[in-house]
Image: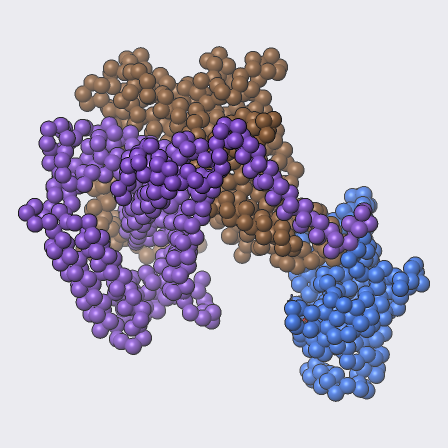
């Protein structure tokens, strides 16, 4: 039996293009304009970043200053260690690198559905963060001790991010449950706290925790500034995440709670076995989005004086011969953020699509 | 007040009142149910049938009156509430199965958490009850993969797994397609024949005729008629009951 | 005690008292400790410092300010600066976002690709990094004497210079109001006379109103023009520096650019979502009624999309206003930076933080209130709509 092609003959390329880009005079103008912009931008970037760029650090900063030279990537080659690891001792920087890998591992594991259980996910995060902390801090297993004051660069950014999530997430669930409480005083007070924190800018909270809080704490509780700032950032995260969790809980049909009550299941078991698993599923896309936002906002700790990746980037070009190479350094840091944030948000969008299909 | 032990009636409701704000939805309801007795409750929409049976296991808190379940008074004592919920099973109109657990997990969960039954034992019991509601082969499926009738039978099995003394049914068949109603009612008839104490809100009058010891008719928050099936269908005293019956039996 | 706790009512009360009391206790402890610590440093609590002069200056202010002015005046200046920067960033971000959003929803694949690239790049890089980048670029620009401008607009390391009319300040403000009226009047007229008049007539009235308001703005500017000076004050090189025109400081320029570009990428997605939410059915119905492309856009798609995106847009605007606190990263004296400076100099930590929180609460609440009003005004009436997926 022969298969007869029933498809209409493919339109010629020219006709197809005419339909897609030049259907009306206005369309044609828009198309040409966009094309011009694209070609210019792509060419400029290509020329600057690759064709005329200087890669070889051994030629020194001078090579970048010759007329016609493009991007000075040699600054990265020369200064990447300070950007990534801050002031961490040179010989111990393998520990920082390993710590960064830990974070990547935590993130990747958290994205695998097989780990989305009430036991595995916390385990991954607690173990991962603990490993991260031990690696950096040392003092055991023959690793030399390195205090928080030498932590810096990308590693510090990641540490703040991971601990913010680790502390903020349980806090968020607690706040969401309290806000849903049937007891009016508890739900109202929690509501005021959540809305209050949400109405403040993150910087003001970080500032309060870093600089103001020590006044209001007894001497023994003041602790290191790093951990206070992490607490502040976790509080901020949890206020937003609590509303996401609450939204998820509201999406669980009322009958679910009633059925488990009728079976005699206690409050905590109801919450942990019936309500939260379903709520977190509803809230997953928004949660990933919140993680993305939090990762971006971690960069704000530079304002309260931490040597995280932005500050170490400033230091990388700020002193000595590389003073002119700020664009390259910022582009490099932007790329690091971009890779992390873009892939995570793409993953979130993918999940959202898949769940929309599943919900039909 | 409380008569302890097996001598106590299954359920004793005295002077029950329930308000939603200004809305008076249960008015001075009195009801005593003996052990093993089957009660069918019917009445027009909004008459308070659901509210009444939901008060029995404290899904709604009653405003005044006394409810004594199996000799335990339902009051603010948290221990009493827990005990009563353990002994009273409930089946809902919309099944309310846990969608993120398999049928087997749905059934075994409460015995494991509440009665602290070991997992293997709970699952074995769950399989026995699934057999009883005639769907043993669906044990590893998720609720979303079952038909409405099958889901409702799972819901019955789930309630039975707690080995309750009393079963409450709130319109268990009214969300089902007609061809699935009988498979659920069959299970309920079997259950009745085994001596379970049952309180069913339903408009399935053939079922009521077959299994009920007494039929209650509720209207505007009151029990206005209470009779054995024969009398109820042929010689109802109350005008509203007769009107309701003529409407519902017309088809 | 233990059997009492088995009672649900008792238990509920105990839980609430413990929770609220515990929190209140914590806060109280914090305040008491802070008072003690501050007293040990020889500082008195209270708001008296608000009336003391600051002894330091701000680098940007819409109102006259000097080191002799009291703290409350500086706080006010800070709030105004925040609002000013916020509004600038908000308007620019909306312009950027609208362009990007329209590109993303247009049928033209090239425009679509451009829009998507823009969103993907700028949404995924922290705003503070973008701010540092633009600030570094601006401060590394040629000095004023070497900078080249176009038609009086000059970008230099000392900031952005642009020509302004030689007009007295009150007249300037009045003209600005007339301009706002030129935009707001037709919208308002469109609402009030919606049902009484045919489309064509309504359009004429709206156009006339806009024309009148615009003419009024021009007249006000001409009247307010200081006689004996050229109408436009164009920045020009004098010695080593540019004189004349309006100088926008590098800090403000960088902040505006960063907020516009970053905010634009978010608003672009909101605009896109708004247009996507307009059901195909509505557009098809309009097509079937024979409306032209522009009519479908302005009468059907735009109004419906606006309604869909406004609530989300409100959140984004609140976020943008809060983002003005980035000012401290480059040294722009916004409200937060002034509070931080006040804490440094006057030491009234708790009071200043209280003022900061109160200020932001007030700003957020008023913004939310304004947008809720708008939202309610334009919301579709009734709840009988069907088939609006
Ligand atoms: N949570 C609630 N808040 C306020 N009023 C309620 C609530 N639940 C029920 N009601 C009201 O109480 C009355 C009795 O409701 P109930 O659900 O008990 O009726 P029903 O007899 O079960 O009706 P149906 O046959 O429709 O299920 C109704 O008027 C209903 O509107
Ligand atoms: Mg009901």
Q: Position of residue C50 (x, y in %)?
A: 40, 40
Q: Quadrant of residue A87?
A: top left
Q: Position of residue A290 (x, y in %)?
A: 49, 42
Query: In this picture, is B86 found above or below C234?
Result: below
- Left or right of C315 on screen, residue C117: left
Q: Count the labels in the image.
A: 0
Q: Position of residue C4 (x, y in %)?
A: 80, 51
The quadrant the C terminus of chain A occupies is bottom right
Q: Residue at x 79, y 55 (%)?
A: B77
Q: Quadrant of residue B45?
A: bottom right
Q: Residue at x 54, y 34 (%)?
A: C35
The chain coloured brown is A
Residue A299 appears in the picture as rendered: no
Q: Nearer the viewer, residue B237 or C11?
A: C11
Q: Residue at x 27, y 22 (%)?
A: A324
Q: Colour of chain B?
A: blue
- Left or right of A265 on screen, residue C181: left
Q: Residue furthest right?
A: B7
Query: In this picture, is C125 found above or below A239?
Result: above
Q: Residue furthest left?
A: C228
Residue B226 appears in the picture as rendered: yes
Q: Position of residue C163 (x, y in %)?
A: 15, 43
- Left or right of A156 on screen, residue B52: right
- Left or right of C265 on screen, residue C236: left
Q: Colour of chain C?
A: purple
Q: Quadrant of residue B225?
A: bottom right
Q: Nearer the viewer, residue A199 or A358?
A: A199
The quadrant the N terminus of chain A occupies is bottom left
């Amino acid at each position: 039996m022969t298969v007869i092609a029933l498809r209409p003959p493919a339109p010629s390329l020219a006709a197809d293009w005419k339909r897609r880009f030049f259907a009306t005079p206005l369309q044609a103008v828009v198309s040409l304009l966009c094309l011009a912009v694209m070609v210019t931008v792509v060419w400029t970037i290509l020329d600057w970043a690759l064709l005329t760029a200087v890669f070889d650090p051994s030629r020194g900063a001078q090579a970048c200053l010759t007329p016609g030279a493009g991007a000075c990537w040699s600054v990265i080659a020369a200064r990447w260690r300070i950007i990534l690891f801050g002031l961490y001792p040179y010989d111990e920087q393998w520990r920082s690198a390993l710590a960064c890998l830990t974070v990547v591992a935590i993130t990747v594991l958290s994205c695998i559905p097989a780990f989305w259980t009430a036991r595995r996910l916390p385990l991954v995060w607690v173990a991962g963060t603990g490993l991260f902390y031990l690696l950096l801090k040392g003092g055991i297993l023959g690793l030399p001790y390195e205090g928080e004051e030498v932590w810096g660069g990308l590693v510090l950014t990641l540490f703040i991010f991971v601990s913010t999530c680790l502390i903020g997430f349980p806090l968020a669930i607690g706040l969401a449950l309290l806000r849903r409480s049937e007891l009016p005083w508890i739900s109202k007070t929690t509501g005021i706290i959540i809305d209050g924190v949400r109405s403040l800018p993150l910087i003001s909270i970080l500032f309060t925790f870093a600089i103001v809080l020590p006044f209001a704490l007894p001497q023994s509780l003041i602790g290191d500034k790093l951990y206070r700032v992490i607490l502040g950032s976790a509080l901020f995260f949890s206020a937003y995440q609590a509303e996401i969790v609450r939204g998820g809980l509201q999406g669980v049909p009322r009958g679910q709670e009633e059925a488990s009550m009728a079976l005699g299941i206690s409050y905590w078991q109801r919450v942990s076995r019936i309500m939260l698993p379903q709520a977190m599923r509803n809230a997953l896309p928004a949660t990933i989005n919140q993680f993305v936002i939090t990762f971006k906002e971690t960069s704000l700790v530079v304002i309260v004086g931490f040597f995280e990746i932005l500050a170490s980037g400033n230091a990388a070009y700020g002193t000595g011969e590389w003073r002119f190479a700020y664009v390259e350094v910022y582009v490099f840091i932007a790329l690091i953020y971009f890779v992390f944030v873009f892939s995570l948000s793409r993953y979130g969008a993918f999940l959202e699509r898949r769940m929309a299909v599943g919900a039909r | 007040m409380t008569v302890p032990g097996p001598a106590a009636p299954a359920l004793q409701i005295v002077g029950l009142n329930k308000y939603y704000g200004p809305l008076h939805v249960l008015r001075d309801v009195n009801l005593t149910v003996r052990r093993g007795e089957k009660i069918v409750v019917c009445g027009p929409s909004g008459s308070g049938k659901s509210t009444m049976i939901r008060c029995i296991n404290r899904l709604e808190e009653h405003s005044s009156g006394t409810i004594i379940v199996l000799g335990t008074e339902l009051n603010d004592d948290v221990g009493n509430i827990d005990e009563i919920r353990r002994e009273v099973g409930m089946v809902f109109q919309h099944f309310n199965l846990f969608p993120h657990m398999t049928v087997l997990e749905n059934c075994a969960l409460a015995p494991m958490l509440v009665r602290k039954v070991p997992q293997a034992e709970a699952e074995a019991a769950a399989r026995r009850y699934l057999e009883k509601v005639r769907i043993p082969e669906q044990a590893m499926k998720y609720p979303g993969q079952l038909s409405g009738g099958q889901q409702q039978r799972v819901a019955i099995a789930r309630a039975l797994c707690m080995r309750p003394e009393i079963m409450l049914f709130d319109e268990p068949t009214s969300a089902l397609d007609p061809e699935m109603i009988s498979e659920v009612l069959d299970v309920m008839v079997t259950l009745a024949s085994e001596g379970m104490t049952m309180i069913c809100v339903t408009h399935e009058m053939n079922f009521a005729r077959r299994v009920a010891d007494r039929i209650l008719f509720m209207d505007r928050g009151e029990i206005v008629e209470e009779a054995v099936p024969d009398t109820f269908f042929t010689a109802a005293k109350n005008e509203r009951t007769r009107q309701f019956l003529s409407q519902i039996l017309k088809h | 005690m233990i059997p009492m706790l088995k009672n649900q009512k008792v238990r509920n009360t105990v839980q609430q008292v413990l929770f609220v009391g515990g929190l209140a206790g914590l806060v109280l402890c914090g305040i008491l400790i802070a008072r003690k610590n501050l007293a040990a440093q020889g500082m008195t609590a209270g708001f008296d410092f608000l009336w003391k002069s600051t002894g330091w200056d701000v680098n940007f202010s819409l109102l006259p300010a000097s080191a002799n002015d009291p703290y409350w005046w500086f706080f006010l200046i800070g709030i105004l600066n925040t609002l000013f920067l916020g509004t600038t960033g908000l308007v620019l971000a909306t312009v950027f976002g609208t362009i990007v959003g329209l590109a993303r929803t247009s049928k033209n694949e090239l425009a679509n690709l451009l829009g998507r690239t823009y969103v993907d790049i700028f949404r995924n890089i922290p705003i503070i990094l973008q701010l540092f980048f633009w600030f570094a670029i601006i401060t590394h620009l040629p000095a004023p004497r070497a900078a080249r401008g176009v038609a009086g607009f000059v970008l230099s390391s000392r900031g952005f210079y642009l020509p302004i009319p030689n007009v007295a300040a009150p007249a300037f403000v009045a003209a600005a109001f007339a301009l706002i009226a030129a935009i707001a009047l037709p919208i308002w007229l469109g609402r009030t006379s919606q049902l009484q008049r045919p489309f064509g007539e309504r359009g004429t009235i709206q156009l006339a109103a806009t024309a009148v308001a615009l003419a009024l703005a021009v007249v006000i500017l001409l009247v307010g023009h200081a006689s004996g000076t050229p109408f436009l004050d164009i920045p020009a090189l004098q010695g080593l520096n540019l004189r004349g025109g309006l100088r926008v400081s590098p800090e403000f320029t960088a902040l505006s650019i960063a907020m516009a570009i970053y905010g634009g990428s978010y608003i672009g997605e909101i605009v896109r979502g708004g247009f996507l939410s307009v059901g195909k059915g509505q557009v098809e119905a309009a097509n079937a009624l024979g409306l032209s492309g522009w009519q479908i856009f302005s009468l059907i798609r735009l109004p419906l999309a606006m309604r869909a995106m406004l609530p989300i847009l409100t959140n984004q605007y609140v976020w943008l206003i809060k983002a003005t606190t980035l000012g401290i990263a480059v040294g722009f004296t916004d409200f937060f930076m002034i509070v931080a400076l006040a804490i440094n100099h006057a030491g009234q930590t708790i009071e200043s933080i209280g003022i900061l929180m109160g200020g932001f609460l007030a700003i957020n609440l008023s913004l939310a209130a304004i947008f809720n009003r708008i939202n309610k005004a334009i919301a579709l009436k009734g709840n009988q709509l069907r088939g609006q997926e």
